[in-house]
Amino acid sequence: MILLLFTMVVGTYGADKFAVTSGGSCTTNGACFQSRNYPNDYGVNDKCSITVQNVLAGETLSSVAFNTESNNYDKLLVAGTYYSGTSGPFNVTVSVNDEFTWESDYGAEKSGFQVCLVGACLETDGSQANADACRCGTVACSSSSGLFCTSSINTCHPLSQLPVYNGRTSGNCGDMDGQIDGQITSQAACEAGAAAQPLSDTTAYPVSRSDYPPGCYYTGYLYFNTDNSNYACSPTKKCLCTLTCQPGTYQDQLGQSTCKSCLPGTYQDQLGQNECKSCGAGSFTNTGSNPGATTCSTCTTIANAAVQCTSDSDQTILTCDAGYYRSPGDASCSTCATIANAATVQCTSGSDQTILTCDVGYYGSSGDASCKSCHGYSLGGSKCVTKEKFKAAYSTQSAQC
């Protein structure tokens, strides 16, 4: 099967935008219409007519897959132009009630086509996913090809990491053999991958051959093969694949052939990301001082303290809890001296304690040296309150100054 650059499943478009008005050789689905049996082979002597039912502002008609017998033997007519082979309509303006026709002859059936109404991608730098299927430069992004669009290289990707390209000399891109890679699905991405390697030829020549690897391959010259063959990669026919960054790694730059490792103090526990996460205070990466962490571990605790560490045995105090202090070089926090009628205190040594809050029936501001008795009622704040407010907050208490 030959797929034109991308494969798409429509997102949330609601009711069908097309209607089959004659013939039974096409079907509609939301924002798309497709040949009979798509993505399997259509039949001989197929015919149908399709009419546009509705179009939203900014939407145009684009093929998301197109593979018919070439030279207009099997052809789709859209807006006065016949399409056949592997080149379907892209970014064609259409209106309500426009009609398209499809017909195949008596032999050489192919996988057919899917054509949809889509708008331009709103997110185009590859960092955020688009909400629905959309145009990304000269290709279309979808839930199956990926809704992350990097329009500068006409590439859609399923995860937030920017595209990374690696080479294969055995098997096929996408084989489950210890590395997570995928087949390059556009000529533009093939050329970007060749530049990232780098290879001597970075201009891909389009071919359709079952005796060569599918997708992007290099023989000394660069080719983009639209035939969906199972021909294996080899040292003389090196395949270029898209590489998914593993946990502990990420990629936030274009044109790379490897992923970056997360630096100490950061980690990544998911596939295909464009940044690492910070472990934060009180934790450390499971690789210690080495890069590439996939998780964080909690520092060994110190009583009444917030701590930092780079391993499970080198914890040091960041700050002491309220009511505690430490002197330089201390390995633990000491209790501040008490202040009469103070609910909580703060200090930086054993002799400079000040209040944070006062007991009920007393008042004072944070930083004061003592709590003062109210001539009325207090909720333990910095001022006295009326008897009514006191009772509303403490209906079962009767602390009176």
Image (cartoon, grey):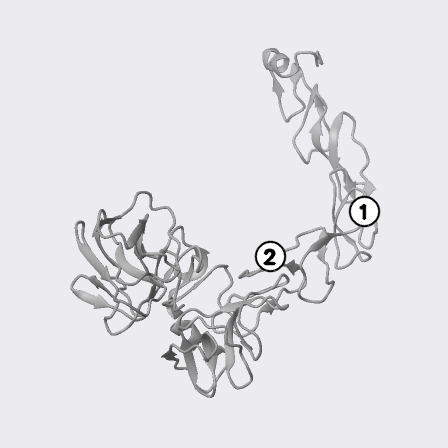
Relative placement, left or right, of 263 versus 109 is: right
Farthest residue to the front: give it.
106
Which secondary structure lies at badge 1?
loop
Earlier in the chain: of badge 1 and badge 2, it is 2
Which secondary structure lies at badge 2?
loop
Relative placement, left or right, of 311 versus 276 is: right
- Identify whether 88 is placed above or below 30: below
**Amino acid at the residue labelled 2:** Gln
Give the image quarter of residue 371: top right
Residue 270 % position (x, y): 60, 57
- The residue nearer to you, when weighing 312 against 140, is 140
Q: Residue shown at 64%/65% (left/top)?
A: 263
- The residue nearer to you, when weighing 370 against 129, is 129
Residue 297 % position (x, y): 73, 53
Give the image quarter of residue 80: bottom left
Image quarter in which the N terminus is found: bottom left
Q: Residue shown at 46%/73% (left/top)?
A: 229
Task: Tell me, yes or no, whether the two marked residues, 1 and 2, touch with CB atoms within 8 Å.
Answer: no
Question: Residue 302 has which mark?
Answer: 1
Residue 232 % position (x, y): 53, 77
Question: Residue 270 has which mark?
Answer: 2
Question: Residue 179 has which mark?
Answer: none
Image quarter in which the C terminus is found: top right
Relative placement, left or right, of 3 versus 59 is: right
